Amino acid sequence: QVAEAVAQPLMGTRRVTLVAAGPGDIGVARLPGEVLDVVTRLPAAIEALTGVSVTQVGTSRTPGSP
């Protein structure tokens, strides 16, 4: 769900210009890695901004709750 939300703004995009330096993929091949990088950093950023650990929120449900 997080990856979908991060990638959602790109759904209607007709043109993407990527500027990058260093080793690794270039062009459109780099885009999935960039999205994955954002998704990987997101939990720490949310916790730093809100004090809420998103990795703990999903595990703190009481038995029988949806």
Image (tube, rainbow, N blue to C red):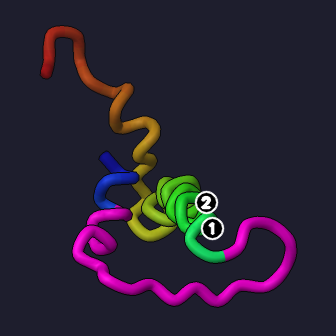
Where does the magenta region start and end? 6-26
The Cα atoms of the two marked residues, 1 and 2, are separated by: 6 Å
Is residue 20 found inside the magenta-colored segment of the image? yes
Q: Would residue 30 appear left or right of 32 to someone viewing this image?
A: right
User: Quadrant of residue 60 in the image?
Assistant: top left
Within the magenta stretch, is there residue 9?
yes
**Given contact means CB atoms under 8 Å apart, are the residues at marks 1 and 2 in contact?**
yes
Amino acid type, residue under disc 1 in the picture: Arg
Residue 28 visible in the displayed image:
yes
**Which residue sits at x=49%, y=54%?**
43
The part of the image, by quadrant, that contains residue 50 is bottom left
Instruction: Please name the residue shown 30% across and 46% down the image.
Output: 1
Q: Residue furthest right?
A: 23
Counting from the top left corner in percent of width and height, residue 3 is at 39, 52
- The residue pinned by badge 2 equals 33
- In depth, the one of 17 and 7 nearer the eye is 17
Residue at image location 49% in from the left, 56% down from the top: 39
Mark 2: secondary structure:
helix
Residue located at (36% from left, 63% from top): 7
Is the residue 63 above or below the residue 44 in the image? above
Q: Amino acid at mark 2?
A: Gly
Mark 1, secondary structure of its residue: helix
Residue at mark 1: 30
